Image (cartoon, helix red, strand yellow):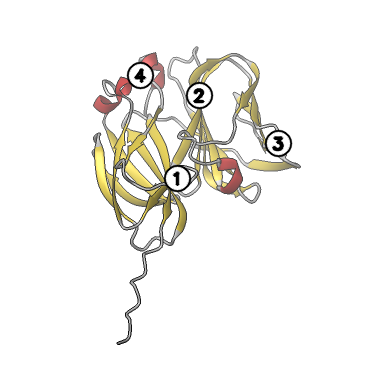
Amino acid sequence: MQKLIIAAVIFLSTTFAMATEADDPVIKNFKLDKKNKSISYELTKPATIRIRVGSISGPQYKTLVNWENQKKGKHILRWDGKDTSGAFNILDNRKFTFSFNYYLPNENEPVMREYAGSDIILSDNFIGRVPVSSRISQNHKKHKKQHCRDIEVLFKVPDNMPRTKEGILKIQGMCPITVEFPDQYKTWFGQERFSINIFIDDVFVKGEAMGYVPYTWNFDTQGISKGKHLITVNLKGFKDHIGVGSLPFVVEPAASAPAKQEK
């Protein structure tokens, strides 16, 4: 049975926090400081921590802390707000959530706890979550350290595709896009098995239950409004690891046909 912990919201100008009536027994006093580009929290005891940031409507954007052993006390994490690919600033224009997982070194049966469940709007673009304590199926404590991590997704498009002055991909009509990840992860993440989940502007559009790389799909901009958009890909491993990457693109307006000359 899951234990529900009710969350309360505290606003401190550009700094705001998510507190709880009955704080998680290990992670306390989580605060996001946009002005100083930092996240802080306290651990009541040593723990192995993972912190992810993602969209309320679907994809994960970045793993901020990747199963790191951390000591008891206050921790400050510097973060510029960028996603894994450096494609966009999450703090500027996205509704996002944080999730925390941890396990304790002295527990015989490691318990994972995640901030998940009902959503709470903390500001115009930050959404917190009601903390829920639960036992997660994967025992990360038994994973090999070098194989227990989230990874980056890479994208490949034809070299002759046009780009804006800022280097953003310009697409009109069809464009083959290939998803890959770095070679050093292929020996273990590929064997772990994973699904492929593709989002456009946080909306799920395509998926493969049994994923593989390199994976190529012919992306078609038909039905997508002109202007700037974002593709985000999540490779969800069957052992609770994830690959994340984002690719911004601009949809070009269709070229108008030349006017017919009257005779």
Q: Residue furthest bottom?
A: 263
* Sequence order check, earlier mark of 4 and 1: 4
Note whether residue 87 is visible: yes
Q: Residue at x 56, y 41 (%)?
A: 89
Amino acid type for the residue under numbered disc 2: Tyr
Amino acid type for the residue under numbered disc 4: His
Vertical comparison of 1 with 103: above or below: below
Q: Residues within 10 Å of mark 4 (few under 14, many from 20)?
A: some
Q: Which residue is mark 1?
A: 168
Front-most of residues 229 and 126? 229
Residue 147 place in picture, x, y as percent: 35, 19
* Sequence order check, earlier mark of 2 and 4: 2
Q: Is residue 50 left or right of residue 182?
A: right
* Sequence order check, earlier mark of 1 and 2: 2
Front-most of residues 214 and 23? 214
Using the numbered discs, state the Cα–Cα distance from disc 3 to disc 4 in whole angstroms: 35 Å
Q: Quadrant of residue 236?
A: top left
Vertical comparison of 107 with 38: above or below: above
Please tell me whether mark 4 or mark 1 is closer to you in this view. Answer: 1
Q: Residue at x 72, y 40 (%)?
A: 14
Using the numbered discs, state the Cα–Cα distance from disc 4 to disc 1 in whole angstroms: 33 Å
* Sequence order check, earlier mark of 3 and 4: 3
Using the numbered discs, state the Cα–Cα distance from disc 1 to disc 2 in whole angstroms: 37 Å
Label 2 SS: strand
Using the numbered discs, state the Cα–Cα distance from disc 2 to disc 4 in whole angstroms: 17 Å
Label 1 SS: loop
Front-most of residues 43 and 174? 174
Q: Which residue is mark 3?
A: 35
* Sequence order check, earlier mark of 3 and 2: 3
Amino acid type for the residue under numbered disc 1: Ile
Q: Which residue is mark 4?
A: 147
